[in-house]
Image (tube, rainbow, N blue to C red):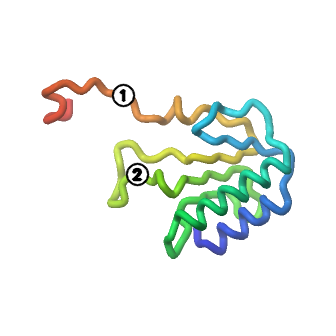
Amino acid sequence: MQWDDCDALLGKLITEPTNDWYFYDTLSPVPQKTIGADELSKKLTHIHDTLKTEHKERYCGIVYADDLENPTFVKIFHPNNLGKACGSSENPPIPQWLLSKTKPQDVIEKFAPTVENKNFISKFLKI
């Protein structure tokens, strides 16, 4: 997504908030109810400011929506948690913020990397 698209999407969600969004910060528990319009606008303003100050790239590339004009799902990655910059990763980063018109599932439980038992040999061999 280009910055113009990101600005338009977040701008619309900030200036025309509705009460039918689930706002899921993946650093917090899964929301059980939708967020109020005013609170959604405040949180998205903070996120937009964070993206603008901490993601100094020519293109946005860390905000995704199912539909730019009438979104029902938006995922936003934190600029400081993008994983490896050179190619794919075994454990790709999880978006920090998810906006959804349907109740979200716990993405941390479902997609977070598993903790492996690291013993002496496994440090040198992938077993």
Give residue 111's position: percent from left, percent from top: 49, 36
Write the residue at 60% across / 32% down: 106
Give residue 40's position: percent from left, percent from top: 78, 49
Name which residue type carries label 1: Val
What is the secondary structure assignment of the residue under circle 1? loop
Write the residue at 40% across / 51% down: 83
- Front-most of 123 and 20? 123
Q: Earlier in the sequence, mark 2 or mark 1?
A: 2
Name which residue type carries label 2: Gly
Instruction: Work out whether 106 lies above or below 25.
Output: above
Q: Are marks 2 and 1 in contact (CB under 8 Å)?
A: no
Which numbered tag is attached to residue 115? 1
Q: Is residue 76 left or right of residue 114?
A: right
What is the secondary structure assignment of the residue under circle 2? loop
Residue named by callout 2: 83
Write the residue at 66% across / 32% down: 30
Q: Is residue 62 left or right of residue 20?
A: left
In the rendered image, the quadrant that contains the C terminus is top left
Write the residue at 72% across / 64% down: 9
Give residue 65's position: percent from left, percent from top: 65, 57
